[in-house]
């Protein structure tokens, strides 16, 4: 009977570790999204000055 409790405890601890790591990934992804947004805002004036609108794709002809 003791091995059942040990197995349940180990499974719970494993799920707890996975939950913590998943939460850390979620926070890192949110931070990365903020950084991408900030960089996009900083690059927007240069993009406008170069004549390329935001989100346009130019196909080279030739």
Image (spheres, rainbow, N blue to C red):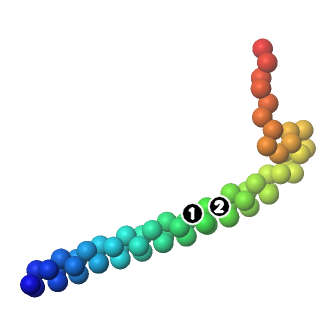
Packing grade of label 1 (10 A; few <14, some 14-19, many >=20) is few
> In percent of the image, x 82 and y 45: which residue is there?
54
Left/right placement of residue 10 relative to residue 46 reads left
Pointer 2 local density, CA inside 10 Å: few below 14, some 14–19, many at least 20: few
Q: Position of residue 40 (x, y in %)?
A: 76, 54
Residue at 90% over, 44% down: 49
Instruction: Indicate whether 19 appears above or below 36.
Output: below
Dot 1 and dot 2 residues touching (CB under 8 Å): yes
Image side of residue 39 versus residue 29, left or right: right
Quarter of the image with the C terminus is top right
Between 57 and 45, the one lying in front of the other is 57
- List the residue tagged with mark 1: 29
Q: Is residue 26 left or right of residue 6?
A: right
**Which label sits on residue 12?**
none
Q: Nearer the viewer, residue 35 or 24?
A: 24
Residue at (89, 45) in percent of width and height: 48
Distance from the alpha carbon under mark 1 to that under mark 2: 6 Å
Report helix, strand or loop for mark 1: helix
- Residue positioned most to the top: 62
* In the image, residue 36 above or below residue 7: above
Tell me the quarter of the picture where residue 17 sits: bottom left
In the rendered image, which residue does mark 2 sit on? Answer: 33
Residue 52, image x and y in percent? 86, 39
50 or 25, nearer to the observer: 25
**Above or below — where is 43 with respect to 18?**
above
- Residue 30, image x, y percentages: 61, 66
């Amino acid at each position: 009977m003791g091995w059942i409790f040990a197995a349940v405890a180990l499974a719970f601890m494993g799920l707890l570790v996975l939950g913590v790591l998943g939460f850390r990934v979620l926070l890192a992804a949110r931070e990365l999204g903020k950084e991408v947004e900030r960089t996009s805002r900083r690059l927007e004036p240069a993009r406008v000055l170069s004549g390329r609108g935001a989100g346009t794709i130019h196909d080279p002809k030739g």
